[in-house]
Image: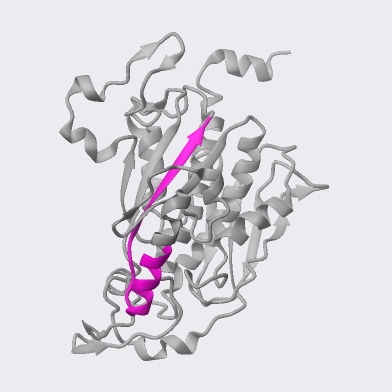
Amino acid sequence: MNSFGNIFRVTTFGESHGAAIGCIIDGVPAGLRIDERFIQSELDKRRPGQNSFATPRKESDTANILSGVFEGKSTGQPIGIVIYNENQKSSDYSDIADLFRPGHADFTYTAKYGFRDYRGGGRSSARETATRVAAGAVAKLMLNEIGIKVGYGLLSVGSIDAKEEDFDFADTSEIFGLDRATEQAMKDEILNAKNSHDSIGGKVLVSIKNAPAGLGAPLYDKLDATLAEAMMGINGVKAVEIGDGCAVSKMRGSENNDLINKDGFVTNHAGGILGGISNGAEIRVTIHFKPTPSIFIPQQTVTTDNKETLLKLKGRHDPCIAARGAVVAGSMAAIVIADALLMGMSSTISNLKKVWTK
């Protein structure tokens, strides 16, 4: 319930307004160089309070490594990372202790557990995703060793679409926009929603390059299914597409099939995955984020004892969760690929012999 992965396995803990959030990463091979500056740089990308396009909540999101690292390298034991919360304002939520916020998990958490932590949503808050970025950074350090690159960026905000895919530019953009030519229009769309006390949805593209053919498994551990599970587990994600995604339902087989020549696949409608197994082409995942449910327009709702009332929300919230969500999506993709690499090592007897035969 709070863990993801098989061999490279991440377990997270903590709440939005608790003392800290953190993760435990199992399965990291011993001897991996753990670059703490890189891990922090990844967290800094997602860190709140940096510009007008994100929540003004100020957090340093400093990664404190507690275990599993010695003299700069992984020991093969669980790596523990804790991130202390520094800027909670729980008083912002005192007025909604007995209310269900529309679009949030308040109602469903209460239905399941009988009560909830109303301070920022507790465990359901996107604050938890910082731990996934920390774990994803460790996964990326592993992927870097074999040349696999994970890129991500904002493909659309509302009706504004990127026309180009420039992952290097996205890495420098305040909103992780993929297209220099449409970035300002995306920013304007976000600020227009914010100034209207509203929010806006967005679409993120994740690209995985240089992944070898053979990752994933048939039937119940398909690579595309695992990627979809990873992305759907991110707060606010309502749909995931692999390759051409929903567009394939309008195609003929002659249009959708990726032809092959001696150099590889001619097209990539499949998004780098066939039969649940990577085919060596670029893996492409598109993730759809809903508008942030925390808005400052009065909304009809009910109290915990089912009395109708009007919600007037206050607090600090992202006007477009897709922007910082892009960082989280890239991190989850790295975790999936790292796990698939480790699992794939046992797929043939020859692989076992390489390791264990002397």
Q: Residue 144: image x %, image y %?
A: 64, 36
Asked if residue 124 lies in the magenta stretch, the reply is no
User: The C terminus is located in which quarter?
Assistant: top right
Give the image quarter of residue 219: top left
Depth check: give the residue in front, 218 or 232.
232
**Which stretch appears magenta?**
187-209
Tell me if 324 is positioned left or right of 108 in this view.
right
Report the quarter where the N terminus lies: bottom left
Q: Residue at x 55, y 61 (%)?
A: 46
Residue farthest toward the top in the current orientation of the protein:
262
The residue drawn where x is 48% and y is 70% is 54
Where residue 354 appears, as percent x and y from the top left, is: 65, 16
**Coloring applied to the structure:** one colour
**Residue, far front:** 181
Please, is residue 249 above or below residue 18 in the view? above
Q: Measured from the top left, where is residue 262 in percent x and y? A: 44, 8
* Left or right of residue 28: residue 303: left
Residue 332 percent across, percent down from the top left = 49, 48
Q: Residue at x 56, y 59 (%)?
A: 131
How many numbered circles are shown?
0
Q: Quadrant of residue 265?
A: top left
Q: Name, please, the residue furthest toward the right.
A: 71
* Depicted 13 relative to depicted 136: above or below: below
Q: Which corner quadrant of the image does residue 9 belong to?
A: top right
218 relative to 301 in the view: left or right? right
Q: Tell me which residue sits at (48%, 46%) in the image.
A: 152
Magenta includes 192? yes
Pick the front one: 356 or 266:
266
